[in-house]
Image: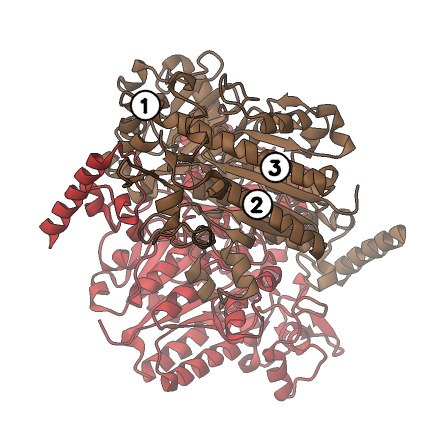
Chain colours: A brown, B red
Amino acid sequence: MSTKRNVLFIMCDQLRFDYLGCSGHPFLKTPNIDRLAQRGVRFRNAYVQSTICGPSRMCVYTGRYVRSHGSSWNGVPLRVGEPTLGDHLKEIGVRNVLVGKTHMVPDREGMARLGIAPESMIGVHVAQCGFEPFERDDGLHPDGPYDPDPAYDDYLRRQGFEADNPWEAWANSAEGDDGELLSGWLLAHADKPARVPEEHSETPYMTRRAIDFIDSAAKDGRPWCLHLSYIKPHWPYIVAAPYHDLYGAADVIPVIRSERERQNPHRVFGAFQNERVAQAFARDGVRQRVIPAYMGLIAQIDDQLGLLFAALEERGLTDDTLIVFTSDHGDYLGDHWLGEKQLFHDVSAKVPLIVVDPSREADATRGTTSDALVELIDLAPTFLDYLGGRPKPHVLEGRSLLPLLHGPAPADWRGYAFSEYDYAFDRIRLALDTPVSGCRLTMVTDGRFKAVFAEGFRPMLYDLLRDPDEFVDLGDDPNYADVRSRLSDAFFTWTRNPRNRITRSDEAVAAKDDAQRHYDRNIESGILIGYWDEADLAAERSLREAYLKSRS
Amino acid sequence: MSTKRNVLFIMCDQLRFDYLGCSGHPFLKTPNIDRLAQRGVRFRNAYVQSTICGPSRMCVYTGRYVRSHGSSWNGVPLRVGEPTLGDHLKEIGVRNVLVGKTHMVPDREGMARLGIAPESMIGVHVAQCGFEPFERDDGLHPDGPYDPDPAYDDYLRRQGFEADNPWEAWANSAEGDDGELLSGWLLAHADKPARVPEEHSETPYMTRRAIDFIDSAAKDGRPWCLHLSYIKPHWPYIVAAPYHDLYGAADVIPVIRSERERQNPHRVFGAFQNERVAQAFARDGVRQRVIPAYMGLIAQIDDQLGLLFAALEERGLTDDTLIVFTSDHGDYLGDHWLGEKQLFHDVSAKVPLIVVDPSREADATRGTTSDALVELIDLAPTFLDYLGGRPKPHVLEGRSLLPLLHGPAPADWRGYAFSEYDYAFDRIRLALDTPVSGCRLTMVTDGRFKAVFAEGFRPMLYDLLRDPDEFVDLGDDPNYADVRSRLSDAFFTWTRNPRNRITRSDEAVAAKDDAQRHYDRNIESGILIGYWDEADLAAERSLREAYLKSRS
């Protein structure tokens, strides 16, 4: 093991697993990401633990399921005290640094209750989800109160791109024939170039900021885990020239949808089909207009990653840096009569995941793919493992991927992957008339079948082998009762076994097992339970002395 | 509603539900507790949420199940930031005050991580589980490192009871014929009087401390919730004169056990039967020696409560003080071939619970009993309700009992009660060879049947109607497959629905439902999802304006 190791943890936002060259897209070119896959392992069954940004990321950054950390939707604060990757890395002297998006919302009430000043070092650590915010930018800065005025706005202004809101007016708007602004929020404008010159758009800017950090970290000397977290190819679907017309309607892969999916669908599925974004993507021509921009945004990321990897190489960091490339969830883009994400079809819940371990132990797997069931909560334990930390299975609910990078998957690798979504915050709750506390959806898959359990409704079920497009919902097919029952059992087992005893490790619980086998350890503390008389107690004390003697 | 209300929350430790006059004990006299029951409601189906002190109390003090707060055994710190009754009461200006035991162990690592100084006001609040420790005394201070030197030791020394450890030497030892100390830890000495004069023993001392607090609080003026938390009748089973011979062997009720329970028992049950304390209580004469002391300790509590209630009355507090009397779990005392607690037979998992609401609304139920299924996590929401706080169902997993005190149980009252126990810390884990993380036991009862689900083993099942003594384990009886299945379904429903979104209330989630029904509220923040063009957006903006106009 080298004396100093780093982690480069790249996350895209809303990038589908199938929109990469290496994952089989017939038209989209991603040579740099493809080369990354050649250097490492590409996981073909990697699932997010929630299908929207905030909760998915909170799972990644804590290594825990939504049911455990409780931040079930965008904007729901992560409870103060919830242990993060940053806490675990801090213990081993590794900086956990952010460039880009986390979607973290601090638990200000909890912080106030505990007297944690938001501007203190600990306050920032807590409020930033355990990250040192070299540059925090959640990537959405519309006109309005949402998340105004990032450092990127100042950057644009310094380049001369003046506006009340340069992010909106330059990076996320096009220009009409008469010089009028055409909002990048509107799908009709997805084929136009953003007003900002490409080199000043968000992806190159964030990439340069990552390199800035890497250079500053060299002076600092401590090892790091850098989370380079791009907002793209997330909406607004608009991209700067020349990426705006790198791809056209002819490059759009066919929509994955079937009339059958609209016929008497599961009520939750049906409610999502009625959402505005779903209806928009169902309109003729919308996919052809939007998807080329989505592809352009990905191509731009790929180009920037080429520059980033070259910068790593130039600085001699390639051999000591674990690199991860992934996304926080996918994007329906009209598939299954849906837009956005939320539900659990593969285009939404499955994400690209490439892991490059530069160490010699990983040479055997370079350039291979793995079909092992992976959850994104595996990343935190993977980073901790690579950086030399001890495993923490009483806190971290994922598992280190390093064994899968060093050889075949362990025999006891997980048999089921889980993902959760809370639709209490969606309009569909009103349509379905579900109580706020009862909007839980849970996906359970064994890789062959995928069930989605919905409180108060029948489950959905898909056969991923016979029906890889997930058109046929077997959720009420009597022939599949056994399959549903098996997946429900796995679901139940999972719900029964959260890692909730986070303040006491398994090792600590078992630390005195050997002594405990030989005598009643309570007598050491003077707590004497079940002793009749002095002779009884003396006998136990003799056992203890004999044990201590035998071990000395 | 009066301008100022208080709560007096009395908890005994290890007091069985059936060791009170009012609950039918044929010999034990508890006139003061019986009078309390006459003034309020006695709940006959009140279950603790864990069957040992620490986790049971953490459930009571947080209003949440073990699976939610994670403190699964004595000594497992309550995670920092876990919301407590004290936090909720603080918000409404009510002091939450402790006299006696909590078994709280602070999460020092978590506090250090968050920069909370243990000696700061917030640090003490966190470390004391949300209590203001007027007098903290966990009641076990043996020679050794367990929990040395409470204020009570100083008190005894001031009275002239000198010893290195006055708690052990005076309050919990007897004296032999030659003046030698006879340890109260040893069951053989349970019939002898403790050396300490009765008025200086623990129960009267704590009662006076409670009255001291009440007097000091009158000067302070703020309303309070006082947790008077007696260590007794918990072991050491020894009591001062005259209580040591108030009862004798003839007053010991028959043991509740059957040979059938020892024949091929469930493996977890069998392992507990092999424990030292179980074997001790199975020996001839042990119950007759120990139980009279246990009864004496209860009689002493009852006498002290008489003084306490008189003190309340003298101070004019009776009409404005909700009084609760309960325990943290029971005591097998040899029943079912067991000692201590841990498992879920009624003598262990069911506790006495009397609630007196002095308000006029509760007049209709005074002196009655209730068979509603009650969980001790109901206490925190009850106190909050009585003291004028808003309900917090997104945090508190129990329900206010006030409706049951004001009339018949609501139609939607719970159908199942739950209790958990983690035997990872018991020697039986070694005997059963269970992994540390797999020692979960969960009791589920509907009041008629009681199942105990044990990870890795078949369930246990008892029919509380036909077999009120719980002698017949129906856990593998094919005739009861339906019952097991129904209780398992209830267990599953419960595991699926923890209150984990603690940073956002249901009300907050639903706050804008009416607006949401009429237009896409995202447009207010500038987040425009699924809009094709300017016309599309303008149409939605018109809907918004129309809505606002209609509501103005």
Foreground: disc 1 or disc 3: 3
Which numbered disc covers residue B525?
none
Judge by depth and name the residue closer to the eye, B140 or A117. Answer: A117
Judge by depth and name the residue closer to the eye, B7 or A502. Answer: A502
Q: Helix, strand or loop at disc 1?
A: helix
Label 2 crowd (10 A; few <14 / some 14-19 / many >=20):
some
Which of the marked residues, 2 or 3, is nearer the chain's N terminus?
2
Residue A520 located left or right of residue B377: right
Q: Which residue is mark 3?
A: A307
Judge by depth and name the residue closer to the eye, B477 or A40. Answer: A40
Q: Chain of mark 1?
A: A
Q: Is residue B278 visible?
A: no
> What is the distance, in whole Å, between disc 2 and disc 3 at their CAs?
9 Å
Q: Which residue is mark 2?
A: A208
Which numbered disc covers residue A337?
1
| Amino acid type at image mark 1 | Trp
Q: Helix, strand or loop at disc 2?
A: helix
Which of the marked residues, 1 or 3, is nearer the chain's N terminus?
3
| Amino acid type at image mark 2 | Arg
Whether callout 1 and callout 2 share a subunit is answered yes
